[in-house]
Image (cartoon, rainbow, N blue to C red):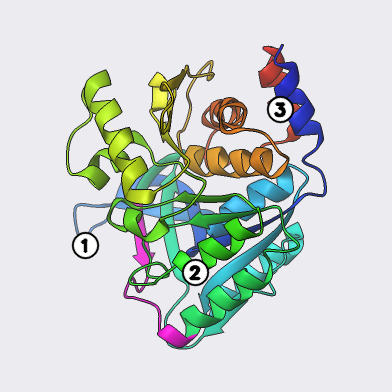
Amino acid sequence: MDKNVIKIIDEFKGRKLVVVGDIILDRYVSGEVSRISPEAPIPVLRERQREERLGGAAYVASLLKALGAEAELIGIIGDDTAGEAVLRLADKQGIDTAGIVKTPARPTTLKTRLVASRQQMLRLDREDCSAVDSSLLASVMRTAGDRAAAAGALVFSDYDKGLFRGGKWSSLIKAWRTAGKPVLADFKPGNAGLFRGITVATPNQKEAAQAVGGEIEDEASLEKAGTKLLKVTAAEGMLITRGPQGMALFQAGKKVMHVPTRAREVFDVTGAGDAVIAVMALALAGGADLRLAARLANYAGGVVVGKLGVALISGNELKAAARGDG
């Protein structure tokens, strides 16, 4: 039993965190396929159900709420029906949306998945990935900066949909770090340099390799990538998630910490990276060091991949995993 981890989990409730990032609406259109279209050699999906869920940075906020924390979501949505759906779903879950900026200049990022018998047939994306207008970006940064005194940690959730592209985030990071608050980032490879001075980043192995312009094929190349990313980001830690191979935590001047995977059976890796950064942020906000936070995040990743689809996790599920009976 991992008693230190369980103690941290008990302290999640009521802790406030701020998530800044690319807000996405995930739409699932499910049904059945029984014939091929006479118009083209493609299956015809007869729709039976339609569901919408929070995605991207909004999903990270959902995970925090499910674990008992208070979450504020800050980002950009369009002045459209998808944006209204985001606000409605967030409100239903109790997520603070005061920092969300609505604009008619770009659409809310919408991912529509066509699903038959739990098999995804097609995904249709509606998005504008160009850099966000400077005035909108300034509003996002100003709001996030104002929250540093009252919140426990700041999470950057980068899906490369335009919010972080071309922005200068160093002053916001500095403000939070000066306030003594941890700052975490899940970045896309081309944006690693935007997050200099953060506490820790949580790229997966593929993203880490792309960020340094190489391949991770063995322990030597993994260590090279992790060390280089520490320098690029000037971070205290770099947690590279490796799927079935677990995680590797890099810290300057310390031996690499390898954390073996905790998943008993993998059903779906969707959302694992978001669960890792959400739980790690909660642990760091509670005073855990990077190594303890990484162990806890590893349990979270193991729980999520044992579920189908984009799933939420509870504190009780994390405790069960830490006890070895979940």
Q: Is residue 172 left or right of residue 119?
A: right
Quadrant the N terminus occupies = top right
What is the number of the mark on residue 171?
2
Quadrant for residue 195, please give it.
bottom left
- Mark 3 or 2 closer to N-term? 2
- The verdict on residue 256 being magenta is no
Marks 2/1: CA–CA distance: 56 Å
Badge 1 amino acid: Glu
Residue situated furthest front in the rendering: 253
Secondary structure, mark 3, is helix
Q: Nearer the viewer, mark 2 or mark 1?
A: 2
Vertical relation: 8 (above or below) 153: above
- Mark 3 or 1 closer to N-term? 1
Q: Badge 1 is on which residue?
A: 39
- From the viewer's side, name the closer residue of 121 and 184: 184
Q: Is residue 152 left or right of residue 109?
A: right
- Name which residue lies at 42% across and 32% down: 241
Q: Nearer the viewer, mark 3 or mark 1?
A: 3
Q: Which residues are magenta?
A: 122-135
Q: Where does residue 299 sit, x and y in percent of width and height?
A: 60, 25
Q: Where does residue 53 sit, x and y in percent of width and height?
A: 58, 56
Q: Nearer the viewer, mark 3 or mark 2?
A: 2
